[in-house]
Image (spheres, rainbow, N blue to C red):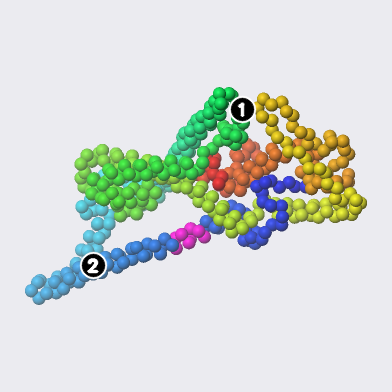
Amino acid sequence: MVTHLQGAGGGGGGPAASGCCNALHLSEDNARFVLLAVVLLLYMVAGAALFQFLEQDTELAMVQKFWDVYSDFQRRMANESSPRVDMGLVHELLYAYGNASAVGLVHKRRRWDFAGSFHFVGTIVSTIGYGSTTPQTEMGRLAVILYGFLGCSGGILFFNLFLERIITFLAYALRYIHVRKLSKRVHEANGLNGRKVCVSSASLDDDEESLDNWKPSVYWVMLCLSVAATVVAACASLMYAPFEHWSFLESIYFCFVSFATIGFGDYVATQAETYPHDNWYRFGNFIFLVLGCCCTYSLFNVTSIVIKQALNWLIARLDFRCERAAGAANRMWRRQSQRIRRRRKSTARPNNLRRQRRPPLPIRHAPLCGDGVAAPNTNPGETGDSDSVYDSDGERRLSGEMISMKDFLQANKVSLAVMQKQLYETAQMQRWGVSAQPARGSGGGFTPGTVGPLAIVSQKLDNNA
């Protein structure tokens, strides 16, 4: 009988600690989802308190100012020396002016000429939705629903394809830099003391032997995308500031709100009646919006990987021992097998054979380059006692006793180093949500994180922390 062997990344072999995930029967993905929901809720509560502190006094001051102006106007109209004015008509005028100003009919360019209509559909496809231009007819609102369904879907697909290509480009660029560094280190090592020195791949880089599968760090990619998004926003702000008569801070604010597809609508470009070099300005506005939205969308998706790493760290920090597939059954089976082994050892052995230890094995050293020294013999079967078999604890095992996977591999002269490395890498990929592509034709269950932008970033980047 062969017991289950646990990988180096799969947790300890002791009894599982009772955490929140085990109590709620949550998998790691579900625990991460619940934790993210809680963190976002707390983040929103903190944000609400922050903006209430920053904006509430200004709002109250603006309300008070409006009522002061209105009261002053009403007091003047009530003066006996002035002709009496119907305040109901004044209220209607103010209401109509407010609506006209909200939809951009006062001191603004035309909304529904071709240029204005193109700007409107651009806000639909990019999902910005400023709100400065809105349909006023029933057929127009129905057309927005049908047009926006396909337009938003195509826009999201465009952003995903851009994300895949920009991540691939950055991966190739960072890989090229990585290879150049490795080559430089090899040349420096070979030129040491004027003689050729054999430098193993382990001394250069643990991943050199599998350089084709090398992936750049998610932090380097996030840094590159941050620089790209900042450069685009800065250049766009330098264009918006003189044309729209905004300050540089207002221009940066507009760029972030637009590039992040938030689209408040308090600042909207190309809305004045006339501009110098009008056509070129509209074309530049279109190019900057496309580049800014693509770069910011890619940056947000890469940043989500870092947030996911933080959630994984928080789960481990809070001792969330999440259940994996058949994890509880495996632990129960392992504990039962260990109890049976101890019972058989204590009952089937004579007392004089229970604690016979084998001598410590000599350490196996890898030969240097060009050395012909053979490694010392580490096989206990070749020491003269071929019938003596020891288990992994150094104790003599009887012929009818259960054998573990580790003892089985040692008895058959199989190195555990390779298997432990593979098990550790597999456990790490499962732990951090990075998995290899499933083989075609294999029965596929859905795994969270294997579709959408998160899957694109996970496949292209090394996101193991």
Check residue 40 for magenta coloring. yes
Q: Amino acid at mark 1?
A: Cys
Foreground: disc 1 or disc 2: 1
Q: Is residue 403 visible?
A: no
Which residue corresponds to the image point at 54% horizontal and 50% vertical from the top-left?
A: 309
Mark 2 packing: few (<14 Cα in 10 Å), some, or many (20+)? few
Q: Residue at x 60, y 42 (%)?
A: 435
Is 242 displayed left or right of 379 in the figure?
Answer: left
Is residue 221 visible in the rendered structure shown here? yes
Q: CA distance from mark 1 to mark 2?
A: 80 Å
Q: Residue at x 50, y 48 (%)?
A: 306
Classify residue 134 as left or right of residue 160.
left
SS class of the residue under badge 2? helix
Task: Decide if residue 343 is on the left or right side of residue 283.
Answer: right
The residue that label 2 is drawn on is 65
Q: Tell me the element at label 1.
A: loop
**Residue 117, how many percent across, how many down?**
30, 45
- Which region shows up in magenta? 38-45
Q: Which residue is mark 1?
A: 198
Mark 2 residue type: Lys
**Above or below, 21 relative to 361:** below
Q: Quadrant of residue 297?
A: top left
Q: Position of residue 33 (x, y in %)?
A: 55, 55
Main secondary structure found in the magenta portion: helix
Left or right of residue 8, residue 180 in this image = left
Q: Residue at x 34, y 44 (%)?
A: 233
